[in-house]
Amino acid sequence: MLIEDYALIGDTHTAALVSKDGSIDWLCLPRFDSAACFAKLLGDDSNGYFKIAPKKTFKSSRKYIPNTMVLETIFETQDGRVKLTDFMPIREDNARIVRLLEGLDGEVEMEMTLVIRFDYGHVIPWVTNRNNVLDAVAGPDALSLWTTVETKGKNLTTVAEFKIERGKTIPFVLSYHDSTVNPPRPIDASYACKETVSWWDNWMSQCSYEGDYREAVLRSLLVLKALTYEPTGAIVAAPTTSLPETLGGSRNWDYRYCWLRDATLTLDSLMRAGFHFEAVAWRDWLVRAAAGDVSKLQIMYGIAGERRLEEYEVPWLKGYENSAPVRIGNAASNQFQLDVYGELMATLHDARTYGYQDPHASWDLQIKLMEFVCNNWNQPDDGIWEVRGPRRHFVHSKVMAWVAVDRAIRAVNDYSYEGPVSHWKEVANSIKNQVLKEGFNSEINSFTQYYGSNNLDASLLMIPIVGFLPPDDPRVISTVNAIEKELVQDNLVLRYRTDQASEVDGLQGKEGAFLACSYWLADCYAMMGKVDKALEIFERLLKLTNDLGLLSEEYSTDHKRQVGNFPQAFSHISLINTACNIKAAQDGSCLPQYSSVPAEKTNVELSKKHFYIPDALKKSNFRHWLYGHNPKVKK
C-alpha cells in the first residue's frame, strides 16, 4: 500500500490511518505518542489491523464529508455497492473508532477482520465476549468491539462474514478503555456520526480564508486540527513513526512530537485563517514547554511538554516496505540547535503583533533566552535538520540566532518592554556581520550550509523570509538562483545534497524532496515579485497531494510517490502560508519591511518601508507578509 493510499481520521487526541481497501493499519491509543495497537503499516498482518471490505473483488473510491475529517469509502462489486463511513467521535470520555456500513445497491457479501496487537504489534491480548461486547485485554490496555453482526475467533483473530443489502446499516464501534474497568457502554453509531460531522463543520465555520485554492487550504487546516492534542494545544509533526524518507533505507524517525522549528509558521497559518483559539493554545504550549533552564531548551517536546523522548528500535517490525529500523522516540531531542531560540522569540513576537498579550512571566523567560543567545550564538550546533554528524557553524542557525535578538529589540521598541537594547543591537550586528563574512561563499556566489562549506542548503531560503536580508539583495538573489540550480529536482527542492553531505548528517542513502522547502522557494519568488514562478511551484505541489488532499513530509522524485511520515503538519502549514503569500503578492498589498538592526558596512542599503495593509486584508486576518516581518498598519 502506498503512503498516499491512506486517509486520516482523528479525535484531537490521536489519529488513525485508513487504507483505500477499508483497513485501519495504524492507530495509537489513547494518545498520539502511545504504543500502537494496529501496526500493520510498519509490519504485516500479524502486527494488527482492522479491516471491513467486500469478500469478492471490488473497486473503491473515497472522500471526506466536506469540512470534516469523516471519511466515506464506496465499495463497488458485481453484486452491488456499499458505503463505509469511518470517523473518531470528538472525545468526551473514551477513545473510539466508529465504522458505519450502509448498503447502497444490491446485496454484498462482506467480511471483517480484527487483529489487535498492543505494544506496536507485539502483545497478543486475551479476548472474551461479555453481553455481545468483545473485550481484548493485555496489561494496562483494553479494546472492546460492539457490532450487530456475529463474530468468532480464528487463529488469534476476530472475524465475521455477513451480507448487507440496500437500506441496511451495520455499526462497528471499537472503544479503548483501561483494563482495570469494564468496557464502556455501546454508543449509537449513526447519532455519533451526525454529532461528529456537526462538530467539524462548526469548527471550520471560523475560517476566514477567502483566497484562491480554498479547498486545499481548508483541508490543510483540518489536518492541523486533527493533529492537535486538545488537552494542551500541542500540534504533532505527524501521527506516525518511521515512514521512510528513503524507501528501503534507514532515514526513519518518530514524528509524534512537537518541534519548535515549526512554531512561527504554525502560528501564522492558524491566525491568518481565523483560528485564534488554536493559535493561542499553541503559543501557550510553547511557553510551558520552554519554561525552566533556558540552556536546556530542546528542539522538540512531547505533546504535554515531556522532555524525555528516549529513542529505541523495535526489532519485531520489519518497517514500511522493509525500511528498517523502526524507531520509537527521537534522540534528536537532545541536540543543541540555535535556531529554536529564534523560532520561540519570533513566535511570541508575532503573537503580540496579532494582538495577544504574553502569558504570565513570558517576558522574564525571554530575557533569560536572550542572555543565553547573547552568550552562545557563536557556538557550533546540530542544525535545523538534526544531522547526526559533528556540530558545525550552520548559517541558518546563525540567522535564527539573529532573529531571536532582533525580535527582542522589536519587543522593546514596539511594545515598551524593558531590556538592554544597546547590548542586543551590538550582538545582532555581530551575528549579521559574521554571517555575511563567513556564511557567503563568493566563489559559488551563494550563502552555504555552514561556514567554510561549498554545500547548499534549502534552509538558506529563510534569509529573506525572516527579514535577515531583503529579497532584492544581490546575495539573496544569487543564493535563490544557486538553490534552484543545484537543489531542485523535478521542480521540487531537496533539503541538501545527501551525496555531498554524508560527513555532515552522519547517514547514508538519498532522501526525497522536502516539501516545505519547495513552499519556501515559492515564498521567496512571491517576495521578489515573481508571482508566476511562485504559482508554478505551488500548483506543482498541489498535484502531489493524494486524492484526499493529504501530504507527507517528502516526495521521491525517483519513485514518483510520497515518502516520510504522513500526513505531515509542516507540509500543510507551508501550503496554507504560501497560498496566503501568493494572494498578498498578487494583490500588491504588502511590501516587506526589513531588519530593525541593519548590519554595519554592508554593500546594500536596506529598505525602511513599512507594510500597508488594506482594510479588506485586516478583516481577513492577513496581519503580515511572512513571519519575519513586523507590520505597521497605516491608519
Image (cartoon, rainbow, N blue to C red):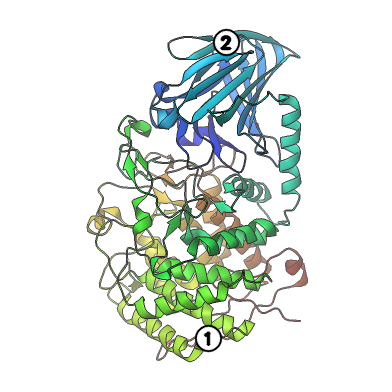
Extreme residue toward the front, this view: 180
Q: Is residue 428 visible?
A: yes
Dot 2 amino acid type:
Thr
Identify the residue at image location x=67%, y=13%: 148
- Quarter of the image with the C terminus is bottom right
- Label 1 crowd bin: few (<14), some (14–19), many (20+), radius 10 Å: some
Q: Is residue 609 visible?
A: no
The disc, 1 or 2, on the residue closer to the chain's N-terminal end is: 2
In this rendering, position of residue 408 left or right of residue 505: right
Residue 65 at what x, y percent from top left? 70, 35
Give the camera-side residue of 413 and 527. 413
* Residue pointed to by mark 1: 419
Residue 443 at what x, y percent from top left? 27, 75
Using the image, determine if residue 8 lies above or below residue 525. above
Identify the residue at image location x=40%, y=76%: 372
* Residue pointed to by mark 2: 151
Secondary structure under tag 1 reads loop
Residue 255 at what x, y percent from top left? 44, 47
Give the camera-side residue of 59 and 238. 238
Dot 1 amino acid type:
Gly
User: CA separation, marks 1 and 2?
Assistant: 68 Å
